[in-house]
Amino acid sequence: MLRSFLLLIFVLGVIGGAAELVLLGHTEDWQQWVPLALFLLSFPVVLFHAIVRRALTFRILQATMLMFVISGVVGCWFHYQAKREFKLETNPALAGWELVREAIFSGTTPPVLAPGMMIQLGLIGLAYGYCRPSSSSTSNQPS
């Protein structure tokens, strides 16, 4: 039951995240395509692991979810850098913690923590992979 719930949360998060990025036009350069590519990659990976549940599919799932987490961290950094540059263009006198605070907490786009969704989805996907299947099904999944 828990596995199914985690899978549902993951799938809904991926669909919602992909729709949001497409609607926002998050496709200007190759770096902005990375989360969309990971969303697309995740469907066959999760589906294959859900059906086969072998050690190899588990490792592939783990690697994919690790890429989600890494892309989230890198995305937060890219968003922070973009906001930092924007803040320096509008107010060159900003420096130090004042600049960091302005870059993180101001209401302008891109939101610095928005890529954190990738981290969250990656962790949900890892939790899905680690949950043991019900006792009625057999599995060679590592513990």
Image (cartoon, helix red, strand yellow):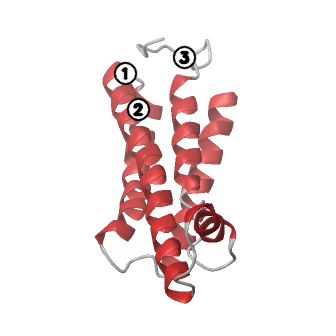
Q: Earlier in the sequence, mark 2 or mark 3?
A: 2
Mark 2 Cα shell of 10 Å, populated few (<14), some (14-19), many (≥20):
many
Residue 139 visible? yes
Tell me the element at label 2. Answer: helix
Separation of marks 2 and 1 at Cα, in angstroms: 12 Å
Residue 24 visible? no
Tell me the element at label 1. Answer: loop
The residue that label 3 is drawn on is 137
- The kind of residue on which mark 2 rests is Gln
Q: Nearer the viewer, residue 127 or 56?
A: 127
The residue that label 1 is drawn on is 54
Task: Identify whether 80 is placed above or below 62.
Answer: below
Separation of marks 2 and 3 at Cα, in angstroms: 21 Å
Task: Identify whether 45 is placed above or below 50.
Answer: below
- The kind of residue on which mark 3 rests is Ser
Number of numbered discs overlaid on the protein picture: 3
